[in-house]
Amino acid sequence: MHISDIFAKHATTFSFEFFPPKNPESADLLFNAIKELEPLKPAFVSVTYGAGGSTRDATNNLVVRLKRQTSLDPTPHLTCVCHKELEIDSILEKYARAGISNILALGGDVPRDKVDYDRSQDAFRYAADLVKHIKAFNAKKGGHADKRGFGISVAGFPEGHPGTPNRVKEMDNLKAKVDAGADYIVTQLFFDNDEFDDFRDRCEIAGIRVPIIAGIMPVTSVKGMYAMADMALGVRFPAPLLRAINRTGGDPEAVRRVGIHWATEQARDLLDKDVRGIHFYTLNKSTATREIYLNLGFKAP
């Protein structure tokens, strides 16, 4: 379903993110989690794309499988790094034929084994350029069943883009992505809702009027917290959250309860402030997301 129709149908969207499994065992675990999350009826689910397209085939396979074998509406990530224009068009054509309605357009990261990679080889340097290209692809129809072509989302960074220390320029870059044709924004994960509120206000000041969906990821372990810090460079863990985790003495179940409670309160506050959507970064697991749903008062499926 095109994102415009999704927003018309839902006053607030709930969505999940998955990443492509690396082997058959992790694929089984992922689809067990999907079976448990599917009854929650998310508005859509996104599928990540590895640095430099390193999971291109795996992403494509997971997206197509979700489309064919589940009731979920998959939105694949697509990045600029390490891609020629023909490669991008080939991917878009595949998704158009498969009936995929929406794309998350990202600048992307250079693979760790290509630290000296020359970005001048890429067809598109920035996400705004990729958005423009997808819009042009839509204009040519590209074999898409929906005459509007793909709905397009882009990333937002409430706590600042790690590659753009200048926060004023950062908003200019986000505005450029929206002006290029992005339909909505999905934010990087954050743990302090004041950061999101400020980000939303700055978007309004900058003239950004598209819907903004908040990205939430619960802390479920101390190890996972450190992994989040590596994955989402610049993410800040508020002192009250750290104090609560320290009070657990490292007990794994207590840490998990603290993380679930914190994420629940984040989601509750966002809902009270009429957030347009909440996007749960699931790490291919279902338990935390299902518990947050129940804590928010939603009826168990």
Image: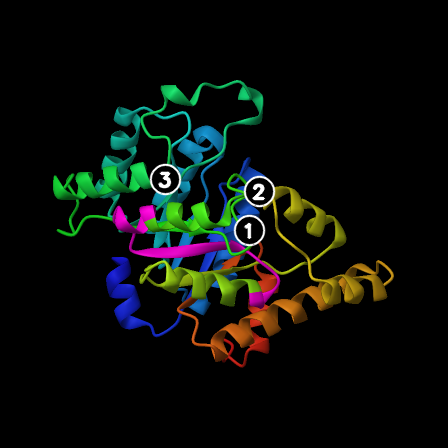
Question: Residue at 19% of width from left, 48% of height from top?
Answer: 149
- In the figure, is residue 278 to the left or right of 251? left
Q: Can residue 35 be seen in this view?
A: yes
Amino acid residing under circle 3: Ala
3 and 1 marks in contact (CB < 8 Å): no
Left or right position of 256 against 289: right
- Taking depth in this image into account, of 7 and 238 the one nearest to the observer is 238
State the SS at label 2. Answer: helix
Callout 2 touching callout 1 (CB < 8 Å): yes
Query: Which three-letter amino acid code belongs to the residue tagged 2?
Result: Ser
- Residue 107: % across, % down: 41, 37
Label 3 and label 1: CA atoms lie apart by: 26 Å
Colour mode of the rendering: rainbow
Q: What residue type is labelled 1?
A: Asn
Q: Residue at x 38, y 63 (%)?
A: 205
The residue that disc 1 covers is 284
Quick one: 245 or 157, which is closer to the camera? 157
- List the single residue furthest toward the right: 249
Q: What element carries label 3?
A: helix
Q: Sort mark 3 into few (<14), some (14-19) or many (20+) by Cα contacts within 10 Å.
A: many
Q: Distance between the residues labelled 2 and 3?
A: 30 Å
| Nearer to the camera, 26 or 272 | 272
Residue, x 36% and y 52% (percent of image)? 74
Residues in magenta, as a range? 176-194
Q: Where is residue 67 in the image (x, y as percent from the top left)?
A: 33, 50
Mark 2, residues whose alpha carbon is within 10 Å: few (<14), some, or many (≥20)?
few
Residue at the disc numbered 2: 26
Membership of 282 in magenta stretch: no
Which of pointers 2 and 3 indicates the residue nearer the eye? Answer: 3
Does residue 40 appear left or right of residue 98 in this picture? Answer: right
Q: Label 3 near label 2: C-beta < 8 Å?
A: no
Visible residue check, residue 278: no
